[in-house]
Image (tube, rainbow, N blue to C red):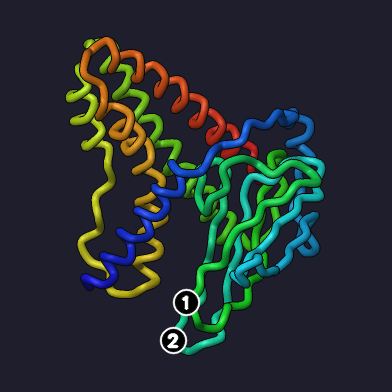
Amino acid sequence: MRTLQRLVLSAIAAAFLLFFAAPIPAQILREPTDMDRRFARHFPERPPLLFESVEDAEHRPLIIITNSHQFSLTAYVVQTEPKSADDRPQTLIHDALTHMGGLFAPIPKGLSHKTGIPHIVGGLVPDAKLVAAVWEDGSTFGPDELLARISDIRKTMADSYDLAIAALQTGLDKNWTAQEYLVAAQKLKPTMPPQMATLEEAMAASDKLIPPGIPSLHITTNMQSKSSSAEAARMAQILLKSFQQSCGALRKALGGTT
């Protein structure tokens, strides 16, 4: 049980570190129109993507996703099949709107995203395959359960942004100190499930814990160094605008997904 708890905590910590360490590239993308969304399609097979498994200079396994659809790729899912009885298959979600999997911006047509494959160092590298994808216009590829999982995570994160936006607005209205923002951020943190009997339950719990924890961590990280109410208010305004934009993008994607 403790091992499973540590597994989830490690996964969450790694996701948070990746979220803050990696830059978010600025991209000017064409916003899909309502007409574009009306003609969004589901690709039953052969999606407009190129999936490659390669090695870097240090012989570490990598996957490269290249988008060939006219609209930007916002999320994709990769599954790994272990070659050892000691390993387990993994479902890896990469989503630009929730910043999961190290994908921090949509992938425009003709561009690629490169990322590593989780594996035991010194062990056999698992086989990886692309199993689902979502584009900006609402087009999709993959089984319903995986597409629903992407949507569920996006909705969870949008809901968490709504709560954080309300807290920041309250703080601005009441001229909170940085300490009061920190207290409010603690209340926004998700609670750890009491019991997780299997590894599958632990990994599923990570999907529910990582997204709602990001707004809280953003507030905590940025408010810790603020010594005056004026500094806290300026930071709250910056965070408020950022959260509103992120939440709006998530809500729009949820409304346009088929």
**Residue 102 percent location from the top left of the image:** 53, 50
Q: Is residue 115 left or right of residue 22?
A: right
* Distance from the alpha carbon under mark 2 to that under mark 1: 10 Å
109 w.r.t. 101: above or below? above
Sequence order check, earlier mark of 2 and 1:
2
Labelled disc at residue 246: none
**Residue 123 percent location from the top left of the image:** 51, 83
Q: Secondary structure at mark 2?
A: loop
Q: Is residue 179 left or right of residue 25?
A: left
**Residue 255 percent location from the top left of the image:** 59, 36
Within 10 Å of the Cα at label 1, are there few (<14), some (14-19), or many (20+) other Cα atoms?
Answer: few
Outermost residue, bottom direction? 85
Residue at left 60%, top 37%?
253
User: Residue 154 or 186: which is nearer the viewer?
Assistant: 186
Quadrant of residue 19 in the image? Answer: top left
Q: Is residue 20 left or right of residue 177?
A: right
Residue type at numbered disc 1: Ile
Residue at left 60%, top 58%?
115
Residue type at numbered disc 2: Asp
The mark closer to the camera, 2 or 1, is: 1
Residue on which the image places disc 2: 86
**Residue 17 percent location from the top left of the image:** 40, 48
Residue at left 51%, top 87%?
84
77 w.r.t. 1: above or below? above
User: Residue 130 or 44: which is nearer the viewer?
Assistant: 130
Count how many numbered circles sit on residues in the image.
Answer: 2
Residue on which the image places disc 1: 120
11 w.r.t. 53: above or below? above
Residue at left 81%, top 42%?
70
239 w.r.t. 188: above or below? above
Residues at badges 2 and 1 in contact (C-beta under 8 Å)? yes
